[in-house]
Image (tube, helix red, strand yellow):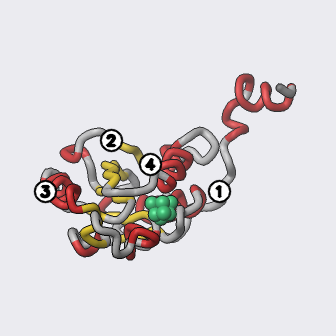
Amino acid sequence: MSFRFLYQTVVHPRKVVKDLGDAPTPQYTAATLHGSLQIRHVDAGSCNGCELEVTSAFAPVYDAERFGVRLVASPRHADALLVTGPVTKNMVEPLRKTLEAMPEPRLVISLGDCAHNCGIFNGAYGVEGSVSDVVNVDVHIAGCPPRPEVIVETLRGLTGR
Ligand code: SF4
């Protein structure tokens, strides 16, 4: 373990945070979100590759929370539903019920190519369809899986921070 690593992670941890530049122009509904976005994540059938990148986006290096975005445990506390993976048949009802449990106004964000068009799982026997086949999607984050920079940039587009 190098001194530089120790300095950046223990002595001065903020130095670890990646500089992602100025806030992008808000593209979606930043005016109604007031710079704060609470997200409930649902894995509807992902291979877990997308989850790794979501975790990375909220971990210390990319630190999405500094831009006003937070993952929450309950849909009742959420402004947005973040869905990964194609929707498997047994996740159709849980996905709809999670969305119904959220207060309005609410956003649906699909993340990853599988969420958009079922990706490599297209036509699989257990797959019902893409996320937009089950619930209305407001924002899509493309990639297989999307890079953490792309995830954070899209979320900043929502909070405007
Ligand atoms: S988009 Fe790629 S990483 Fe994400 S669930 Fe599908 S196959 Fe896995």
Q: Position of residue 66 (x, y in %)?
A: 52, 45
Residue type indicated by callout 1: Leu
Q: Residue at x 74, y 23 (%)?
A: 11
Residue type for callout 3:
Glu
Disc 3 within 8 angstroms of ligand 1 (CB): no
Which structural element holds mark 1?
loop
* Label 2 beta carbon within 8 A of ligand 1: no
Q: Is residue 93 left or right of residue 147?
A: left
Residue 68's mark? Answer: 4
How far apart are labels 1 and 3 at the CA level? 34 Å
Q: Which residue is identified by label 2?
A: 72
* 1 or 2: tag closer to the N-terminus: 1
Could you give the CA–CA distance between mark 3 and mark 4, rounded to whole angstroms? 24 Å
* x and y percentages locating residue 154 in the rendered image: 49, 64
| Mark 4 residue type | Gly
Mark 4 residue crowding within 10 angstroms, few (<14) / some (14–19) / many (20+): some
Query: Which mark is nearer the camera, 1 or 3?
Result: 3
Q: Amino acid at mark 2?
A: Val
Which residue is under mark 1?
Answer: 20
Q: Which residue of the protein is positioned furthest toward the front in this rendering?
A: 125
- What residue does disc 3 label? 100
Nearer-N-terminus badge (3/4) = 4
Above or below, 82 relative to 122: above
Label 3 SS: helix
> What residue is rendered at 50% in x and 45% in y?
55
Q: Earlier in the sequence, mark 2 or mark 3?
A: 2
